[in-house]
Amino acid sequence: MADFNLYFRLGTHHILTWEALDHILFVTALCLRYQLKEWKKVVLLVTAFTIGHSLTLALGALGYVHFARNWIEFLIPLTIFATALNNLYQSPAKPVNSSGLPLIYFFALFFGLIHGLAFANTFISLEGREDLVAHLFAFNVGIEAAQLLIVAIVLGISYIILNILKLSSKGWLNIMSILIILASIKMAVERWPYNNQLHT
């Protein structure tokens, strides 16, 4: 139980820090088009993301997949950019229809695969091989708990903005998505893998 608590805390700490701003921005971009009353849709969305990052986190930590860390770090702001850009072309709270799930659910699943590789790099730096599966589980549960906290905060802020301050849902979605796009571009430029070569 002590090991579970340790790796659970490591998972939550990995998300709830300034260094995890990229992950916080991504989860925020996923949630922006939804309102508090639609929390079940958001849980489903975050679950799709969790499935993706859990898979590559496990495969990376177990040594089955290997990717250059600098490219993974560069791709993460691109996932943020694509998700926020998609928000600009969608109606907020677009209902799920009979033809299938909205595209954002597939964004979440696929982009989760990329984020999981970044988690794997962090996890490998902490971990040996003993009790690896149990530690992976606890670490991932910690990540998920932190993500749900971010979701709750974003939905709470959206509720205040839309229902108390009376800003239009489309206006709120567009303003926040544009700010996230600008932040993601800055991150991508800073993380361009060939930066070191350009300065040498």
Image (spheres, grey):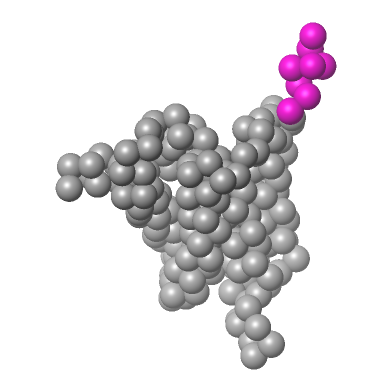
The image shows residue 114, relative to residue 96, as above or below, that is above
Look at the image and tell me whether residue 139 can be seen: no
Residue 98 rendering spot, x and y as whole percentages: 64, 90
Residue located at (61% from left, 68% from top): 105
Residue located at (60% from left, 44% from top): 65
Q: Is 11 colored magenta in this rendering? A: no
- Quadrant of the image occupied by residue 7: top left
188 or 75: nearer the eye?
75
171 or 55: nearer the eye?
55
Left or right: 106 as drawn, with respect to 25: right
Left or right: 108 as drawn, with respect to 50: right
The image shows residue 125, relative to residue 82, as above or below, that is above
Residue 153 rendering spot, x and y as whole percentages: 40, 55
58 or 189: nearer the eye?
58
Residue 74 rendering spot, x and y as whole percentages: 69, 36
Look at the image and tell me whether residue 147 can be seen: yes
Q: For the magenta stretch, what is the residue range? A: 193-200
Residue located at (65% from left, 67% from top): 106
Residue 36 rendering spot, x and y as whole percentages: 44, 70
Left or right: 125 as drawn, with respect to 6: right
